[in-house]
């Protein structure tokens, strides 16, 4: 089970990993207080392609709009530092991909349970129990979320 970053394109999910939509419930200060699973996307398609430019008309799936909007999200994270912070993976933990969102806007793609994340060039990031992959296309820590979606107008839920 792997999540692959496709160059200038979507996330490719290989294997039978559940994809869930998860609402982040927040308090008045904006702090997440609860996660509520809303639905699980049932598709037998393998691999699955999840939008990471934030502009698909077929969310959460890629519809090719990344090509039209000139999406380019080169990886900028410090790979060595990321891998140095490797965790012990609980192999009994559920492996999942979660499409996180608040009541008002879309957020990152949460990857949990030690699912392998593979960079555009084939680099394998150390598995973590939880990681958040940017899907607004504006993070300064690509491929990981840095909270930029909070200011990205195209991530507002209409």
Image (spheres, helix red, strand yellow):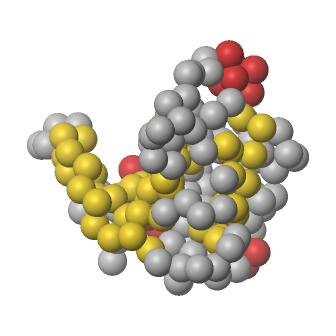
The answer to which image quadrant residue 20 occupies is: bottom left
Point out residue 72 in the picture as x, y percentages from the top left corner. 75, 58
Residue 104 to residue 80: above or below: below
The answer to which image quadrant residue 55 occupies is: bottom right
Point out residue 63 in the picture as x, y percentages from the top left corner. 64, 82
Q: Does residue 139 appear left or right of residue 101 in this picture?
A: right
Q: Does residue 61 appear left or right of residue 11 in this picture?
A: left
145 or 114, which is in the foreground? 114
Point out residue 57 in the picture as x, y percentages from the top left corner. 53, 83
Q: Does residue 2 appear left or right of residue 90 in this picture?
A: right
Q: Does residue 30 appear left or right of residue 145 in this picture?
A: left
Residue 88 to residue 112: above or below: above
Residue 109 to residue 115: above or below: below
134 or 130, which is in the foreground? 130
The answer to which image quadrant residue 67 occupies is: bottom right
- Image point 56% across, 50% down: which residue? 134
Can you name the residue that lies furthest to the left here? 28
Point out residue 52 in the picture as x, y percentages from the top left corner. 61, 62
């Amino acid at each position: 089970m792997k999540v692959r970053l496709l160059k200038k394109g979507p996330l490719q999910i290989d294997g039978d990993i559940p994809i869930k939509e998860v609402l982040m419930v927040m308090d008045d200060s904006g702090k997440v207080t609860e996660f509520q699973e809303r639905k699980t996307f049932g598709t037998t398609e393998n691999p699955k392609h999840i939008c990471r430019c934030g502009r698909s008309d077929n969310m959460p799936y890629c519809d090719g709009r990344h090509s039209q909007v000139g999406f380019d999200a080169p990886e900028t994270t410090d790979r060595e530092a990321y891998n140095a912070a490797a965790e012990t993976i609980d192999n009994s933990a559920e492996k999942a991909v979660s499409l996180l969102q608040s009541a008002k806007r879309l957020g990152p793609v949460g990857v949990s349970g030690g699912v392998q994340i593979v960079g555009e060039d084939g680099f394998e990031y150390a598995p973590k129990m939880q990681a958040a992959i940017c899907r607004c296309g504006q993070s300064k820590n690509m491929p990981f979320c840095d909270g930029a979606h909070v200011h990205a107008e195209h991530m507002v839920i209409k």
